[in-house]
Image: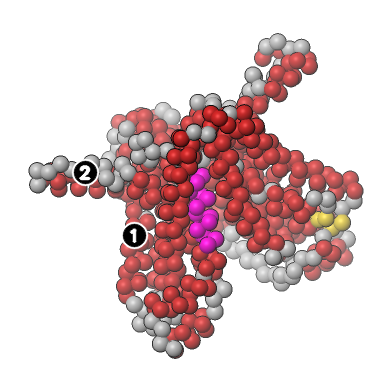
Amino acid sequence: MILGFARRWSLISYLIAVILTLPLLAIIVQAAVPGEAIFAHLLDTVLPTYIFNTLALMLCVCIGAVVLALPAAWCIARCDFPGRQLFQWALLLPLAMPAYVVAYVYTDLLDYAGPIQRGIRAVFGWQSPQDYYFPDVRTLMGAAVMLALVLFPYIYLLARTAFMEQSSSLQHAARVMGCSPWQSFWRLSLPMARPALAVGASLVAMETAADFATVSYFSVPTLTTAVYDTWLGYGSLSAAAKLSAIMLLVIFCMIGSERFARRKQKLFQKQAELNERDRYPLSAPKAWLATFYCAGLLLLAFLLPFGVLVSYAWQYFEVSWNHEFLQYSINSLYIALLVALLTAVIAIVLMFVRRCSPRRSDLLPSRLASTGYALPGTVLAIGILVPLTYMDFTINDIYAYFDRQGPGLVLSGSIFALIFAFSIRFVAIAIGSVESSYKRISPTLDMASITMGLRPNALLRKVHLPLLRKGIFAGVLLVFIECMKELPAALLLRPVGFENLATYVFQFVSDEQLEHGALAAIVIVLVGFIPLIYLNRSLEHNT
């Protein structure tokens, strides 16, 4: 700790925290305004359906993601089978694939006019849908399957790490007591991995609640689509804010219940490095079954959709490679890079204050700033529109008071709103990355620097920043990728005539013309490979 820590650093951190929590406060204040006719109409008609669909979708996706991820995580962490080294990182690749792209590809394959149903009719001689039954893809369950295919790596990664970090001595003891690999998994490893599974399921649930494109494409009404339709369809910011408040209540209740369920859970174990001798040697049939399972999961979740995208891009390259594609790519890169650098600066300031301030109250700004990641994109957009619109009207009123022409929507109608939203949404990622790096810096180094007469500014510049380079780079990289993929906030906040790759691809998906946007989708996916490769290299040091 730095005694006599400069008050200006503390004030700056609180100012940043207030700015980053402004949308959340705006939603709460706007939602408290007395109801209007539109919200009352929604409450009496479709709002219960929105809430039920949202909760049902979250539950189904979580169950599906756990069912898909657990076998792969256990086999890769604790068993030896052909292809294990490949699958341990390849099963992370579905995270790079936008869920709405996967939904389009499978809808195209499984619809009545798709190749699969055409093949079935050709083989059996059926002529119409009345001759056979085939499940409808565009349903709530269909959306749940699509989202589970894309989001299961969250649970896979956390569960695999938990299984790898479990003490080998416990596994050896289970073997001595005669436990089979299945009994060892069910009685020992799975209960010990429950905290990791709970965290992974919470992440999956939040991502599901925040999804807009997939449920919109499948015409499944949820709270996310309700917020979007209420604002753009009815033009009611107040009703949209009330729906956003309900959505926030659902998310915070989910997070709170997860933490409450684990409030008395404590796990202490001696971690040991896992080596090849600690893995269960599976018999040939079981080993190949594990290989086929992981290969099938990778095929369905990533290889097949990506292969279809490559095929589309090859066939329609001349149509896709145009001025719009290049301009929207530049827009995406520009916004993503600017937000990544801005969030890195914010994270450095907040974590520097958190580390060095002797006041416990200075821990609060970094925690408040991280709450933005829990806000779905549509909710965040409404929370930003409320204060920015008020500021725009205030600015124009001041100009009118002096009989001058106002600048118009200088804040809410420009890319400032987009940058502001992305910064609030993803600053938690940068904070987490910098915090992780700070934990590796010994406090004695700070004490030695203070003894040598370094003031806070010099300590940050000469000592901390050189040691934080890897963490800062990782945070910048992860925020950059998330900005490239973010869709709901971009749809609501982008200025008139402004598009990025995510909105560009979604327009083609909505028009059933993904073929023309396949090249842009491939760019988003390929950019998403970068953090996954970086993450896998980090994990390999712990394998």
The residue depicted at 32 percent of the width and 34 percent of the height is 236
N-term-proximal mark, 2 vs 1: 1
What is the x, y in percent for residue 422?
43, 50
Q: Quadrant of the C terminus?
A: bottom right
What is the x, y in percent for residue 537?
66, 60
Distance of mark 2 from mark 1, alpha carbons? 26 Å
What is the x, y in percent for residue 14?
34, 65
The answer to whether residue 98 is magenta is no
Q: Residues within 10 Å of mark 2 (few under 14, many from 20)?
A: few
- The residue that disc 1 covers is 18
| Magenta-highlighted residues | 473-488
Q: Is residue 97 visible?
A: yes
Q: Is residue 222 visible?
A: no
The residue depicted at 87 percent of the width and 56 percent of the height is 281
The answer to whether residue 482 is magenta is yes
Q: Is residue 158 left or right of residue 389?
A: right
The residue depicted at 23 percent of the width and 41 percent of the height is 408
Q: Secondary structure at mark 1?
A: helix
Tag 1: amino acid: Val
Q: Quadrant of the N terminus?
A: bottom left
- The residue that disc 2 covers is 407
Of tags 2 and 1, which is closer to the observer?
2
Q: Is residue 337 left or right of residue 131?
A: left
Of 525 and 36, which appears nearest the observer?
A: 525
